[in-house]
Amino acid sequence: MAFFVSDMTAHGQETSLVGIYQGSELTAAANHLGRGGYELSDGTKVSFDKWYHSKWIDMRFEMLTQLSDDFGLLWGASTGQRAEKVRIEPSVKLGFILQKRPTLSTTLSLTVTSILGGNLTERPCTADYGAIGGFQTVNCRLAASQLRPADTLKYMANINPSRLKLDLRFTGKF
């Protein structure tokens, strides 16, 4: 990485680390899915946490390659995260920032970024409904609900990250 940054600086461009982040709105959604549980027919409590808790939390980094005084490329990536019943895919972030200075004390900037990948998907469970229902594939969180087992599958989480972000700012110094 240091070699890459040095090479970019040598050609009149500069690459800077914008930030390193852990967690996202999808990490929060995965944590929310892990809340609660249910009770088996023999009274044993089953917590969702063991299925939805990840030991590794999604880690992201973002970089800015400045191509001119008023234009730069934003780019980065994330590692994703995985638990037994939920997964956040790794992602790539691409974008640009364009700024103009209408006066010496004001700046107008437009930032556009897009995320490729990074979807959150939930995996089903196999539940034993005894002599009446046998083994069936179900949404883990709704296995003990009043819904028919097959109907629970349409409530499986499949969440995309915010794909496109536009940020227009006008700042001034007083």
Image: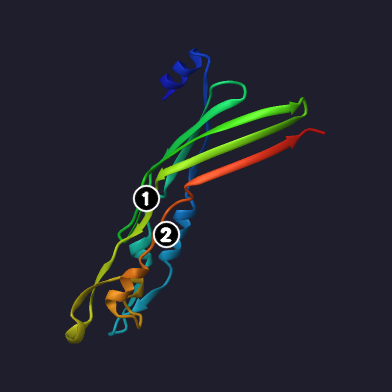
Give the crowd class for mark 1: few <14, some 14-19, many >=20 residues within 10 Å: many
Which residue does the image show at 47% across and 41% down from the upper left? Answer: 114
Q: Nearer the viewer, residue 140 or 42?
A: 140
Colour scheme used in the picture? Answer: rainbow
Q: Report helix, strand or loop for mark 2.
A: helix
For this orientation, the residue located farthest to the top is 10
**Residue for badge 1:** 81
| Quadrant including the C terminus | top right
Q: Quadrant of residue 93?
A: top left
Q: Nearer the viewer, residue 58 or 142?
A: 142
Left or right for 32, reference 104:
left
* 143 relative to 13, above or below: below
Measured as percent of width and height from the top left, residue 150 is found at: 27, 75
* 128 relative to 112, above or below: below
Left or right for 146, reference 26:
left
* 102 relative to 47, above or below: above
**Residue for badge 2:** 30
Q: Nearer the viewer, residue 58 or 8?
A: 8
Give the crowd class for mark 2: few <14, some 14-19, many >=20 residues within 10 Å: many
User: Which one is earlier in the sequence, the residue at label 1 or at label 2?
Assistant: 2
**Amino acid, disc 1:** Gln
Measured as percent of width and height from the top left, residue 33 is found at: 41, 65
Which residue does the image show at 49% across and 13% down from the upper left? Answer: 11
| Quadrant including the N terminus | top left
Measured as percent of width and height from the top left, residue 32 is found at: 45, 64
Measured as percent of width and height from the top left, residue 158 is found at: 38, 59
* 105 relative to 82, above or below: above
Which residue does the image show at 38% across and 47% down from the upper left? Answer: 80
For this orientation, the residue located farthest to the right is 174
Q: Are marks 1 and 2 in contact (CB under 8 Å)?
A: yes
Left or right for 33, reference 125:
right
